[in-house]
Amino acid sequence: MQTQRGRTFLHGKRKAAIEAEVLISEDAGVIEGVVDETDVEEYVDNLDRGYQRIDDLEKYGIDEKDINKFKKYGFFTIEALTYVPKKDLISIDGISEDKVNKIMKEVKKLTNTSFSSASKILEQRQNLIRIRTGSRAMDRLFGGGIETGSITEVFGESGVGKTQLCHTLAVTCQLPGDEGGGEGKCLWLDTEGSFRSERIFMISEALNLNYQCVLDNITIARIYNSEHQMEILCEVSALMAASKYSLLIVDSVMALFRNDFKGRGELADRQCCLGKFLRHLLRLADEFGVAILMTNQVSAIVDGSVQMGCPDKIPVGGNIIAHASTTRVSFEKGKRGKRICKMYSSPALPEGECIFKVGESGIEDYEKE
């Protein structure tokens, strides 16, 4: 059976079946054309997740040992195999070209890798889940909140509220969909040691949530160098295939790359490694339908090219970061505790800005005193 590659989280088995355009009998609760109840549960469960576990390939004649080899290289879903060229799969120890051809033949049957109508894409985007930021003004700027299935980049100087947004979203992503949440867990890659569990406690208390449950649903990985930052993504894939996550935070994306690659002589190597990391992030967003929020640093323009009215600081990472980020916003400091969020780049949202503040509940609307 074919399933659409997930872009949204589907709530409830009946809704999942309806969106897949299959029928459920009101009396028997069985999908039309499927006899075994176990198959029904498994099929709808795949739809609910939006992806299919790679272990399912065993039912189509793929050896369990070969499946485990793919897992070793970070492939935990059937959809993941569609994101890499055949030569990369052949390079895996013990996987021959004949095996790859056989496996990909089954993968193509099980995934939607062909054309889709624009109206179908519009329907999917209208059902897209957005995670609330804590500020109504910022939610409006984002078109309803942080978009799932894509990368959002927030850049700015130190102390403008980037990490505070991360803490807020780590809580709100767990809320039900009708409350502006993603109904999933949060996974946080901490490259600067900025995560604070007590901040999660404060935000949870302010939102009348059980802080212990909220903390239990946040998984933290402290990252120490750029190699570790790249390698950890295989573990991220494993976690997301095993449980439902709605948000992946990378705070910050460039800190370790800037530290490990110094000077113009290593710039090409840095951008190459950064590109691989970002491509894997894009795959995770597409594969699991999670929202990816990455914070970024800025650097000053010092070559005298700053013109009147133009920014004197730019996000680091160059064009590679710019092309990987679906939505880019800047955070700036204002007077009397104000923070300014500006829409920097988006394929669907207009330019604009909003004012917010950082309070006990994290990101909040700025109210005039």
Image (cartoon, rainbow, N blue to C red):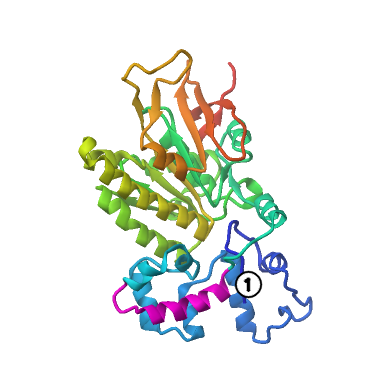
Q: How many marks?
A: 1
Task: Report whether residue 360 is seen.
Answer: no
| Residue, far right | 26
Rendering coords of residue 90 (x, y %): 35, 73
**Residue 330 or 90: which is nearer the viewer?**
90
Q: Where the C terminus falls, by quadrant?
A: top right
Residue 104 falls within the magenta-colored stretch: yes
Q: Which residue is mark 1?
A: 44
Q: Horizontal placement of 264 versus 2: left or right?
A: left
The main secondary structure of the magenta stretch is helix
Name the amino acid, label 1: Val
Instruction: Give above or below for 142 relative to 125.
Output: above
Q: Element under label 1?
A: helix
Q: Residue at x 36, y 61 (%)?
A: 234
Rendering coords of residue 70 (x, y %): 37, 72
Rendering coords of residue 178 (x, y %): 66, 49
- Mark 1: few/some/many CA within 10 Å (<14, 14-19, 20+): many
Q: Magenta region: which residues?
A: 92-111
Q: Where the N terminus falls, by quadrant?
A: bottom right
When asked about the image quadrant of residue 66, the answer is bottom left
When asked about the image quadrant of residue 13, the answer is bottom right
Q: Horizontal placement of 222 versus 248: left or right?
A: left
**Residue 276 or 135: which is nearer the viewer?**
276
When asked about the image quadrant of residue 238, the answer is bottom left
| Residue, far top | 308
Rendering coords of residue 181 (x, y %): 58, 48
Q: Horizontal placement of 296 versus 222: left or right?
A: right
Q: Residue at x 46, y 28 (%)?
A: 331
Task: Report whether residue 59 is seen.
Answer: yes
Residue 35 falls within the magenta-colored stretch: no
**Residue 96 or 349: which is nearer the viewer?**
96
Instruction: Give above or below for 124 relative to 29.
Output: above
